[in-house]
Amino acid sequence: MVINLDKEWFELVIEAKELGISITEIREFFKRKVYQNTEVIALCTTFNKNEQGYKEWREKNSNGFVFNHFGNTDSAKQMNKIHRANCTYLKRSKDEGKRTHPYEKICSTNLESLKEHLNIPWTYCKKCI
Ligand SMILES: [Zn+2]
């Protein structure tokens, strides 16, 4: 079977892969866009056991926002914070090598999109926002 994929689409898929965006996330993005019929929503990218992808995302999107996802238990809820991508808390050297596990990061260039994406309790980091 020969698949004829437009060159631009092909490049877009490659680019998405390099950014660490999964096919599932792209599908969800289109679904939300169709169902909500709102303005373009910035993608939220989840980094789970992806230190390199997360590092690159933060370097490219220093004006973006990062959600530190500790979990959904009562004690973890207090720790679920939205940071600015350039927050010093996210750069602590003691977290080197374990920034995306066991606690994943959810990132977006747009704060509203990130907030909309999160269906769990969270608060802002007092240090950076
Ligand atoms: Zn912060």
Image (spheres, rainbow, N blue to C red):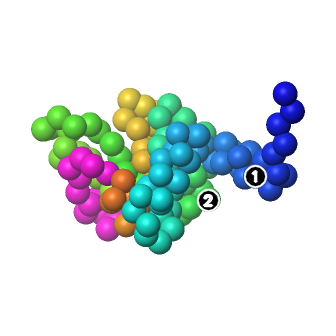
Q: Who's the residue at 44% across and 66% down the image?
A: 37
The tag on residue 60 is: 2
SS for dot 2: helix
CB-based contact (under 8 Å), mark 1 and mark 2: no
Q: Which residue is drawn at 74% across and 45% down?
A: 14
3 relative position to 103: left or right? right
- Which secondary structure dominates the residues rendered in magenta? loop
Residue visible at 26% across and 60% down in the picture: 124
Q: State which quarter of the image contains the C terminus.
A: bottom left
Q: What stretch is highlighted in magenta?
A: 118-129
- Residue at x 38%, y 29% (from the top left corner): 102
Q: Is residue 112 above or below residue 48?
A: below
Give percent across and percent down for residue 18.
Answer: 68, 44
State yes or no: residue 122 in magenta. yes
Counting from the top left corner in percent of width and height, residue 74 is at 12, 38
The quarter of the image holding the N terminus is top right
Q: Front-most of 122 and 85? A: 122
**Residue 22 seen in the figure:** yes
Q: Which amino acid does label 1 sit on?
A: Trp
Q: Is residue 38 magenta?
A: no
Tag shown at residue 9? 1
Q: Of label 1 and label 2, which has the lower sequence position?
A: 1
**The disc labelled 2 sits on which kind of residue?**
Lys
Q: Where is residue 110 in the image (x, y as percent from the top left)?
A: 45, 66
Asked whether residue 54 is in view, the answer is: no
Q: How far apart are marks 1 and 2 (CA)?
A: 22 Å
